[in-house]
């Protein structure tokens, strides 16, 4: 009988431990003090929860935050930055922070299920607005959504908002560039091999019977060297893209996107050892032997660091020397409808020169380079400082509205 009683007590203790482990200690935040008791006749098992009840009664639960509301009127898209502003539908002093999500898209309106880009997350925003800066606007729109968080939980997302991020995006047109230029997307470099490397890639093989001898002893009046070639054997015909390749002394590459209307802006940075380069725009009809600024179908700024240092504006074979320091980076502003092409110091936004004309055809960004390279920044809005300067410039005669009174080169 004693053995049976001892076994029964052990079973009851085991059962009490199981109850504690399975049903009570799951809430690790509470300090539990179980007091299991067995009645005299062993028909009841009692557990004292009085202390835990008092703890539970003193707890205060935070509600789930409501979804914020993004105010499109208060949102701002300028200078390749986007400021997003929102508010809570009702005051909630328990909000700890906000989470903003954004993604680029080419679709107007609400985000689509099968969109091409994933949401990017910005966490721990303490205020009710946030500015994303230094963006490249390589899509037409951006989607935004935000949600509020307190110390316990994150709320639902706001209704998404789509903002327009219009900017000019273009790459360099490798199919018609001079064979002495190595072109990749938004970078161009002088190729001292005479384009053999590119021909090999484009044609799939290299003509071993073609030899080029380059002499740097002959120069143009502008100071740009004029390599002289002697061909031995037959050379394969130039590869044709959308137009003839530039050749001869026209070390030119054009952009692959035409400007037909509106205001646009891009920036160009030259390598420190670049001997000579030009930056501007040209009609599609620019001849394959033509140099930028030497025809009535092209406008440019030319920088020459070969033998003599010159900085000049060129159009229709006329030159205007510029008495300013060559900037580290050039900003190019093209107002197609207003007939204006302006060049800026991209860092200080100082106006360097403006052409006033009437564009009668779509224009393409144009670049010439010799012994060095250029890199482009596209997907840029017209900076606010440039817009302000352009308004002032349009109200005046301009720094140089024509090249009629300059020396003909």
Image (cartoon, helix red, strand yellow):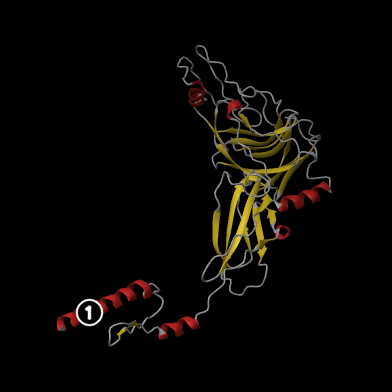
Residue 163 is situated, as x and y percent measured from the top left of the image, at 68, 51
Against 114, residue 92 (above or below) is below
Identify the residue at image location x=58%, y=71%: 95
Residue 178 is situated, as x and y percent measured from the top left of the image, at 59, 26
Return the residue at label 1.
8
User: Residue 361 occupies which quadrant of the picture?
Assistant: top right
Residue 335 visible? The answer is: yes
Residue 390 is situated, as x and y percent measured from the top left of the image, at 77, 48
Residue most toward the top? 233
User: Residue 172 occupies which quadrant of the picture?
Assistant: top right
Identify the residue at image location x=57%, y=24%: 227
Left or right: 229 in relation to 76 = left
Against 298, residue 25 (above or below) is below
Identify the residue at image location x=28%, y=83%: 42
Residue 165 is situated, as x and y percent measured from the top left of the image, at 67, 48
The quadrant the N terminus occupies is: bottom left
């Amino acid at each position: 009988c004693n053995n049976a009683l001892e076994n029964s007590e052990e079973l009851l203790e085991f059962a009490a431990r199981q109850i504690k482990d399975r049903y009570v200690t799951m809430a690790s935040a509470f300090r539990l003090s179980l007091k299991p008791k067995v009645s005299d006749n062993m028909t009841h098992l009692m557990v004292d929860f009085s202390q835990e009840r008092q703890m539970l009664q003193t707890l205060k639960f935070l509600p789930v935050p409501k979804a914020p509301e993004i105010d499109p009127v208060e949102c701002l898209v300028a200078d390749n930055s986007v400021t997003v502003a929102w508010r809570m539908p009702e005051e909630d002093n328990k909000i700890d922070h906000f989470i903003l999500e954004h993604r680029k898209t080419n679709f107007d309106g609400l985000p689509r299920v099968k969109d091409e880009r994933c949401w990017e997350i910005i966490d721990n925003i303490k205020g009710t607005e946030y500015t994303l800066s230094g963006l490249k606007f390589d899509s037409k729109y951006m989607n935004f959504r935000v949600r509020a968080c307190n110390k316990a939980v994150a709320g639902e997302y706001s209704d998404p908002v789509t903002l327009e991020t219009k900017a000019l995006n273009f790459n360099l047109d490798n199919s018609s560039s001079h064979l002495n230029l190595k072109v990749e997307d938004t970078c161009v470099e002088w190729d001292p091999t005479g384009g053999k490397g590119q021909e090999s890639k484009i044609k799939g093989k290299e003509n071993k019977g073609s030899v080029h001898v380059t002499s740097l002893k002959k120069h143009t009046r502008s100071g740009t060297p004029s390599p002289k070639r002697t061909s031995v054997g037959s050379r394969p015909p130039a590869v044709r893209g959308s137009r003839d390749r530039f050749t001869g002394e026209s070390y030119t590459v054009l952009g692959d996107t035409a400007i037909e209307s509106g205001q646009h802006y891009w920036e160009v940075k030259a390598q420190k050892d670049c001997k000579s380069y030009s930056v501007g725009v040209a009609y599609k009809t620019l001849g394959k032997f033509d140099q930028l600024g030497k025809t009535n179908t092209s406008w440019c700024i030319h920088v020459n660091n070969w033998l003599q240092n010159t900085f000049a504006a060129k159009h229709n074979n006329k030159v205007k020397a510029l008495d300013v320091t060559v900037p580290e980076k050039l900003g190019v502003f093209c107002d197609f409808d207003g007939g204006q092409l302006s060049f800026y110091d991209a860092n200080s936004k100082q106006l360097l020169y403006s052409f006033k004309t009437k564009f009668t055809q779509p224009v393409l960004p144009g670049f010439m380079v010799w012994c060095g390279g250029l890199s482009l920044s596209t997907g840029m809005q017209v900076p606010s400082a440039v817009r302000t300067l352009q308004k002032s410039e349009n109200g005046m005669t301009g720094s140089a509205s024509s090249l009629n009174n300059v020396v003909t080169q």
